[in-house]
Image (cartoon, grey):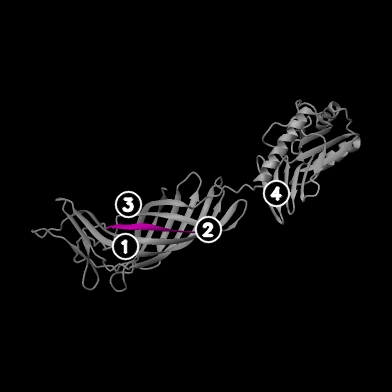
Amino acid sequence: MKKFIAIICLVVSVFNLSAKERQDSLILKIDKRNQTLIGGKDSKRTLKEELESAFEKKGLVLTDSLWQNIRQAIKTDSDGDSSLSVRIGNSSVKIGIHKSPLRGAVISQESLVTSQESWKNSGKKEEVRIGLDGVHVKDGTEETHVTWDGVYHRDGKEVTKVIWGKDTTKVKRPNLYSRRGLDFNLGLNTLVGGEPEIAVAYPGAPAYIPNFTLDPLGSRYASLGISRFVTLSEGKKSAFRLGYGLEIDWYNFRFDHNRIATKGPNGVQFNAITSSTGKEIVMSKNKMSVSYLTLPIMPHFSFDKKSAVQMIAIGGYVSYRIDTWTKAVEEESGNLRKETTNLYVNPFRYGLRAEFALRHFPDLFFSYDLSPLFESGKSQEMRGLAFGIRLL
């Protein structure tokens, strides 16, 4: 702490001396990108004219050889800053060449530092030096250097840097699509798998509707979960990531007939409900629902948010069944018939999933169960299929 207080005092003393004493040194700063003098007042003049004017105010002359050295330093293909130091007569001149303009205090083309001056504490290890290149404080293996672009502190091999204004060494990360946060998916689901055809009972009888015939728009899928990812590889315009998360999803299979699914002794049964007169009761709603706790694993490519296709993911999922129930509502009376049962639905589920993120359009998802919906031998081998859009 004492050393940093001493540094601050030294810096303050430098500026106090510069205000009181005659300056015999000149510091100029050049914007390498625009080839202009930082702090120059006349933007219509060329860089050489600005330098010549600054030299004349100090009673100096910009020689052709010095001008050629400045031009060579500007043209050098370097990502960092550079500087030139020369001595003309009794005056010292330092020219800093910066890749981009410095932020912070306004820098004028007049002298900012007093004449070169240094002193040492004789008989001690500590050394303090003030010059055109800044303030140096050295104590054994520790060394602190305060210059116009920041503070550098060295302790042995360890170096700490504090940069004034914008740190030009930082690399701007690409603005890529992020599969992270709260997810809410909504879509439709159906069952894939064949059922054996049943012959018509007698000529002219109404066509038989298979048990797993669904209402296309009434069979809805929904999921709510949280997504995260880890980056495996990243470039300037794309990244390969591994997405994962945890979600709860619901299959809602709405049947397009009046038979209710029940758990029979040997498998899934579909029974019609009849009135006292033997007439089949019509159902306004007749569905079977299954809820799962799902772990998706989604390797995916993320692209820039300005591109038309922002993300492509192809992966899979594993699920554990939480609950299964049936719900039927009589059309005429409104009576509700609800039963909670496992209905021989497999406790575990696994399948494939694909996701696509498009610009100016909701994200799309498609999932297909590789495992059958019901236990083996308890019903037809049906598999779930869902697709839709991501709302969150």
Residue denoted by label 4: 153
10 Å crowding of disc 2: few (<14), some (14-19), many (20+): few
Question: Helix or strand or loop: what does disc 4 sit on?
Answer: strand
Choose top left, top right, bottom left or bottom right for residue 190. bottom left
Estimate the spatial distance between the alpha carbons at disc 2 and disc 1, rounded to whole Å. 28 Å
Label whose residue precedes the other's in the sequence (2 or 1): 2
Label 3 to label 2: alpha-carbon separation: 37 Å
* Mark 1 closeness class: few <14, some 14–19, many ≥20 residues within 10 Å: some
Looking at the image, is 45 positioned above or below residue 93? above
The alpha-carbon separation of the residues under discs 3 and 1 comes to 24 Å
Name the secondary structure under disc 2: strand
Measured in 3D between alpha carbons, the distance from the residue under mark 4 to the one under mark 1, in whole angstroms, is 60 Å
Label 3 or label 1, whichever lies nearer to me, is 1
Reading the image, the residue beneath label 3 is 217
Return the residue at label 1.
Answer: 322
**CA–CA distance in space, label 3 to label 4:** 69 Å
Amino acid type indicated by mark 2: Val
> Is residue 357 visible in this depiction of the protein?
yes
Type of residue at label 3?
Leu
Q: Amino acid at mark 1?
A: Ile
- Queried whether the magenta region covers residue 190, the answer comes back as no
How far apart, in angstroms, are the residues tagged by discs 4 and 2? 35 Å
Give left or right: position of 68 versus 295: right
| Residues shaded magenta | 241-254
Of helix, strand and loop, which one carries label 3? loop
Q: Position of residue 354 (x, y in %)?
A: 46, 58
Q: Which mark is residue 230?
A: 2
- Residue 156 falls left or right of residue 206: right
First reached walking from the N terminus: tag 3 or tag 4: 4
**Amino acid on which disc 4 is placed:** His
Counting residues from the start of the chain, the first of labels 3 and 2 encountered is: 3
Disc nearest the viewer among 4 and 1: 4
